[in-house]
Image (cartoon, rainbow, N blue to C red):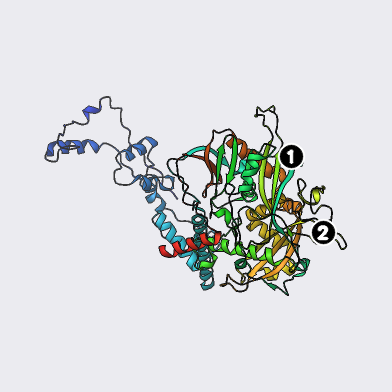
Amino acid sequence: MEQPCEERPHFEHVSNPESLFRCHPQRNGWGPANCDKEVRSECLAALAHLPFEPNVRPSLFSHQLFRACDFTFHVQQRQRDGRDPRGIGVAFADEEQQFQTVDNRPLLKRGGGGGWLHKRRAPVKQSTAAFNEKNKEEEELRLGKKGKSEQKKQQQQQQARFARIHARHRAFSEWSVQPTNEWAVEAEIPLSQLYKHAVESSKIKVKDLAWRGELRTYNKQADQIRTKLPVALQNLSSNFDYYWVTTQDDDLIKEHMLNSSEPIDVAATDQVLAVLMAAPQSKYSWHLHLTKVEGKLLIGKANGSIVDLLTVNETASEPPMQDAENRLNRPAALGFEAVKINQNLRQQLLVKGEDPVKFPPPPFVEAGDNPASVAYRYRLFTIPGRTAGAAGGKSRQPINIIARTEVNAKLPQAAGTPKPAADAEPTTGHGRREKEDSDPFGKDGGGYVYICALNEYDIKGQKNWRVQMETQRGALLATEVRNNACKLKKFVASAMMAGCDDLKLGFVSRKSNNDNEHHVVLSVQSYQTRDLGLQIGLKPDNAWGIVRAIVDLVMDKPDGRYVLLKDPTKPVMRLYSRPEDEDEDGEEDEKAPEARADDDEANRNDEE
């Protein structure tokens, strides 16, 4: 039982507090001076009249006064758990000791889920390094040997992926020609903007001007080649002469531009026009020479440039690297290999022992040459003009483009049908789409054939052609369209300009991974040129629209020399103007692609 409280003494109100104490200022410290015993005794004597009960709860005002002189504890310690450990807690410490609880059972511990992760750990320094170190230790405890090996494998794969990305950027960073300080940028064309240009291809008029060379019949037995019984690719390129004549060096083009009854505005070849038509898909750097003289435009290429090479896996996610360990798999070597494969296949798929249809020899063939069997078809394309639209565009006049195209073969003619005259002078028509009387093969039902090839250099991969050709032929074509989109569009564009309704696509593979001289033909697929073009995303309206846009851009410039250059690091091509007295960029010496590839490989070996 609690004892009754004793009666507390009553104090009268003190009107003057100064009467209780006498204050003596202390200039050297705080409080009364220690040496003044008289003052100290008087002060302590006055405190004897005041009550002192430690168990009495301090008032809020006095509690705040106590805190005013608290200089020994940090603010975090004093305010932890929302109360002052030296205030109310100390005041109730003695009072709590006077009472005892009736229930001595231990309190139940609140469940925390168990496990070492829920136990209280010693506080650690909250820094980035300490946090990372703590997470690393926890992961090491959780992961076993298998987990660590898998994690290491993932890190290696990620490093290899980054290495491929960096190598891919290095491969794309090489310029086909380096711009000089004397070149002035006339225009910058994003490749994405090229998709917006279009003309109605159905309104384009086509007229044959001349045929040169010879034309043989396609051997239909090549369509029976299968993967289980591949055919060795013969090395025929060394037996014939091939030509990479630029537009400026073709005398027949010059003759037609000067003496033609119809005005000719632009001169080019199917090779350079195909580069423009497939420009939106290009990744590597390339450049074309454009010369405007008296309102006429000549579009050509530099001898031995990348335009003469056939790129391999240019648009693939992992294209060939310039610093590949196997030098046979570097871009320049693969491009030269692809050129030889196409040359050999185009001669091997022809009927042997049959007299070809002969035309006058090309103007660039010299005496003593043994030219390969190919027909050069000089054609005149008339692109219709347009009027100024509501958007404020300029009105354009129709433009006439003369182009030298190539036809590789013709389909076998029907039995009993007489052969066409070899000296026929065609003037119009382009294959089965326009079977006019002037077409030498329009009457006998035969069509023109364009032959091209894709080559495989990694035959040990999981998805090699020998496996996919039999079971996943559609998936194989889709993969090659993705990896070689630019090259396939060039093939289809060249076939369309030559008037070849049939395109023969050969799939050629190496006999072994480290042998780029011996190949086998796994299959030859037949396609309709226009159908294949739509399948790979090449629309004739857009293809001719790109050509028209580039021609209009240069036609608005003054006469002079220009260079259209594709940037290797950005999807952009730029039009540069060059000084009239500037020499060519060191590429005008006549070089075949194989010579250029050999020079590049020799220079690279010297650098290494």
Residue at the limit of the structure toward the front, as seen here: 367
Residue tagged by mark 1?
200
Which corner quadrant holds the C terminus?
Answer: bottom left
Instruction: Classify 10 Å Cα crowding around label 1: few (below 14), some (14-19), many (20 and above).
Output: few
Residue at the limit of the structure toward the right, as seen here: 416
User: Where does residue 94 sit, x and y in percent of width and height?
Assistant: 37, 51
Please tell me which residue lies in front, 259 or 211. Answer: 259
Kind of residue at badge 2: Lys
Please tell me which residue lies in front, 495 or 334. Answer: 495
Please tell me which residue lies in front, 477 or 591. Answer: 591
Kind of residue at badge 1: Glu
Instruction: Classify 10 Å Cα crowding around label 2: few (below 14), some (14-19), many (20 and above).
Output: few
Query: What residue do we see at 85% from left, 59% from top?
Result: 418
Query: What residue do we see at 66% from left, 60% from top?
Result: 480
User: Where does residue 36 sit, x and y in percent of width and height?
Assistant: 12, 38
Q: Is residue 170 left or right of residue 427?
A: left
Any part of residue 142 in sight: no
Query: What residue do we see at 56% from left, 37% from top?
Result: 293
Residue at the limit of the structure toward the top, as seen here: 15
Any part of residue 429 in sight: yes
Please tell me which residue lies in front, 324 or 560. Answer: 560
| Residue 582 position by quadrant | top left
Give the CA distance from mark 1 to mark 2: 35 Å
Question: Element under label 2?
Answer: loop
User: Where does residue 332 sit, x and y in percent of width and height?
Assistant: 53, 61
Residue tagged by mark 2?
419
